[in-house]
Amino acid sequence: MSADALATAVIAAAGSGERLGAGGPKALAEVAGRPLLAWSLAALEGAAAIGRVVVAAPPGHEEEIGAIAGGAPVIPGGASRSESVANALKEVESELVVVHDAARPLATPELFDAVVSELAKDADCDALIAAAPVADTLKRAQAGRVIETVSRSELWAVQTPQAFRAEALRNALEADPEALARATDDASLIEAAGGVVRIFRWDEPNLKVTTPADVAIAEALLRERGLAIAR
């Protein structure tokens, strides 16, 4: 992080970890020798474009998250991901903000710097989101029966980090509670509000840890990078 940085980072770390079977908040689950949250914090520490980090924690676990966050502000999350981000945005004063899921431990400092830099250069853009082209064949089905094969030529698998103009994101988060509960990423709220969202292509591994199998894959990739901590 740098004193001359352009953006604040919000880490969405309020996930329950139920599908992971972690027995507690996902952000506290150990991956390659560290709590999952710690990998995102380490990447942000190395990002020149990030000047400050705010962490949205599972309510009731602020102290545990704070012990990992190294002095970064920790605020209680909400009932939905979007509510957690909205709570964290109250601590953001910069013009640009980057939202990142704690469940993506493979994001690099270079990726954080790139999305912030590209957004800062494009005054007409409200959000710039990391994404990769969809590689699999896609089919639409009803009750298990294939209805059609969907062209993947214009489809992207969306990731985080996602960089926003903070005011545009605040306005988008004023949507009704049902819309917030349905949103699976913050960029979709910008789209619904009529904002401009652009893709930043990122082909490096950046998986979201959701299941125990994902943990194994993430650990293997972190070892490959020489980052895993010996037990």
Image (spheres, rainbow, N blue to C red):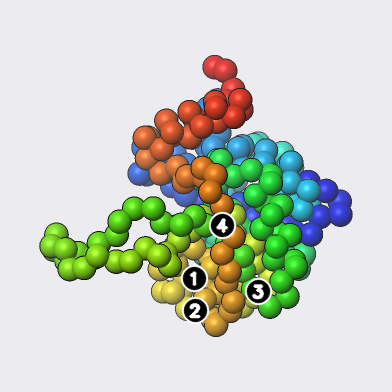
Q: Are marks 3 and 2 in contact (CB under 8 Å)?
A: no
- Label whose residue precedes the other's in the sequence (4 or 3): 3
Separation (CA) of disc 1 from disc 2: 6 Å
Amino acid carrying mark 3 in the image: Cys
Task: Classify residue 38 by image quadrant.
Answer: top right
60 lies above or below 180: above
Q: Which residue is mark 4?
A: 201
Q: Which residue is labeled 2 in the image?
A: 192
2 vs 4, front mark: 4
Residue drawn at (45%, 42%) of the image: 209
Q: Nearer the viewer, residue 79 or 140?
A: 140
CB within 8 Å, label 1 to label 2: yes
Q: Residue at x 49, y 70 (%)?
A: 188
Name the residue that disc number 3 marks: 125
Task: Name which residue type carries label 4.
Answer: Arg
How many labels sit on residues? Answer: 4
Q: First in sequence: mark 2 or mark 4? A: 2
Viewer-nearest of labels 1 and 4? Answer: 4
- Quarter of the image with the C terminus is top right
Q: Is residue 84 left or right of residue 97?
A: left
Instruction: Left or right? Give the position of 74 relative to 230.
Output: right
Which label sits in the foreground, 3 or 2?
3
Residue that appears at 37% across and 35% down: 212
The residue mark sitting in front, 4 or 3, is: 4
Q: Residue furthest top?
A: 231
Q: Amino acid at mark 2?
A: Ala
| Residue placed under numbered mark 1 in the picture | 188
| Dots 2, 4 in contact, CB < 8 A | no
